[in-house]
């Protein structure tokens, strides 16, 4: 069975090849490991193999794994982002662990974060999550409201809005998947014009479709199963 180090190298090679195919420089695309359901020891293995950016979906799981992960991997070697749906009553807790919340999905959450960050006297990088596929099960702002939400978030002085995130369409139809990623890039371009800031980050693409995302301008792909293997499914 290939180990995490081999899988990580294989994923990096896929990203690099996708960049070359798109006429982009491979260092334009960062790899974030989506580590939901993975025990701290496996995440630490990935960090030992060179991973630097970790994404977690649930605050409770993030908190539960924190001590062990920090002890195994060393606190300075990795950075964590929050990539799941963030309930407003978990805002205080999540800020202890992450340098970026990728899943800001409305002004109300932005306000909660802003108030807490004022108390802590710090700032936070954020991405606005957009539901580009329109599936009811997906979180994120509807595309039609995305530019307005980015504009509002950008007014909160403790939040540094760096760009947009999407989970994209889950479909075997490659053209439709690419269209959902293209939609995110186009929304980013419009929002950047309105806000008058660069919004450089496009977080999109997962194990099954990172090539499509890189072709449409992803600057960060979020990878789980291609590095860790299939996730154990809850019964
Ligand atoms: C799980 C997850 C990923 C990675 O999915 P894989 O298909 O396992 O690569 C990416 N983004 C989010 C938000 C996730 O929850």
Image (cartoon, rainbow, N blue to C red):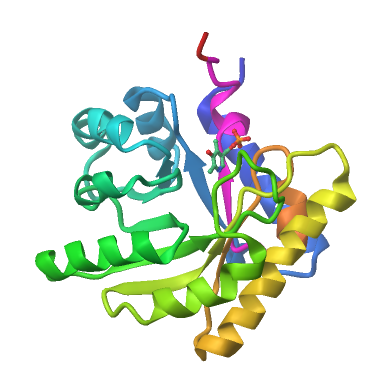
Residue 186 x/y as whole percent: 71, 73
- Is residue 9 visible to us here? yes
Residue drawn at point x = 76 percent, y = 64 percent: 182
Whether 148 is drawn above or below 93: the answer is below
* Left or right, 39 with reference to 136: left
Residue 230 shown in magenta: yes
Residue at position x 37%, y 22% in the image: 39
Q: Where does residue 92 sit, x and y in percent of width and height?
A: 19, 50
Q: Give the magenta range.
A: 216-233
Q: Is residue 125 above or below residue 38?
A: below
Q: Position of residue 15 (x, y in %)?
A: 68, 51
List x then y, in percent, for residue 212.
78, 53
Question: Which quadrant of the structure image shows residue 217?
Answer: bottom right
Instruction: Kindly identify the residue that appears in the image at 40 percent across and 25 percent down.
Output: 42
* Residue at far top of view: 235
Inspect this view and state whether residue 18 appears: no
Q: Quick check: 178 left or right of 24?
A: right
Magenta span includes 2: no
Name the quadrant of the N terminus: top right
222 left or right of 107? right
Which residue corresponds to the image point at 53% horizontal and 83% vertical from the top-left? 198
| Ligand 1 image position (quadrant) | top right
Q: Nearer the viewer, residue 148 or 41?
A: 148
């Amino acid at each position: 069975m290939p180990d995490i180090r081999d899988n990580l190298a294989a994923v990096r090679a896929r990203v690099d090849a996708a960049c070359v195919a798109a006429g982009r420089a491979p260092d334009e695309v960062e790899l974030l490991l989506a580590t939901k359901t993975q025990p701290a020891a496996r995440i630490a293995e990935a960090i030992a193999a060179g991973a630097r950016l970790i994404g977690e979906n649930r605050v409770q799981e993030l908190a539960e794994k924190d001590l062990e992960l920090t002890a195994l991997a060393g606190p300075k070697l990795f950075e964590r982002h929050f990539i799941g749906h963030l309930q407003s009553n978990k805002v205080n807790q999540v800020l202890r662990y992450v340098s970026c919340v990728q899943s800001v999905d409305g002004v109300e959450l932005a306000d909660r974060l802003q108030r807490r960050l004022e108390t802590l006297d710090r700032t936070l990088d954020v991405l606005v999550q957009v539901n580009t596929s329109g599936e009811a099960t997906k979180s994120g702002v509807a595309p039609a409201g995305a530019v307005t939400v980015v504009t509002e978030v950008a007014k909160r002085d403790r939040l540094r809005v760096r760009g947009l995130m999407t989970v994209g369409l889950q479909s075997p139809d490659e053209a439709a998947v690419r269209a959902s990623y293209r939609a995110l890039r186009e929304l980013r371009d419009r929002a950047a014009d309105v806000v008058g800031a660069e919004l450089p980050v496009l977080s999109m693409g997962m194990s099954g479709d990172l090539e499509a995302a890189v072709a449409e301008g992803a600057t960060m792909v979020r990878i789980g199963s291609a590095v860790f293997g299939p996730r154990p499914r809850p019964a």
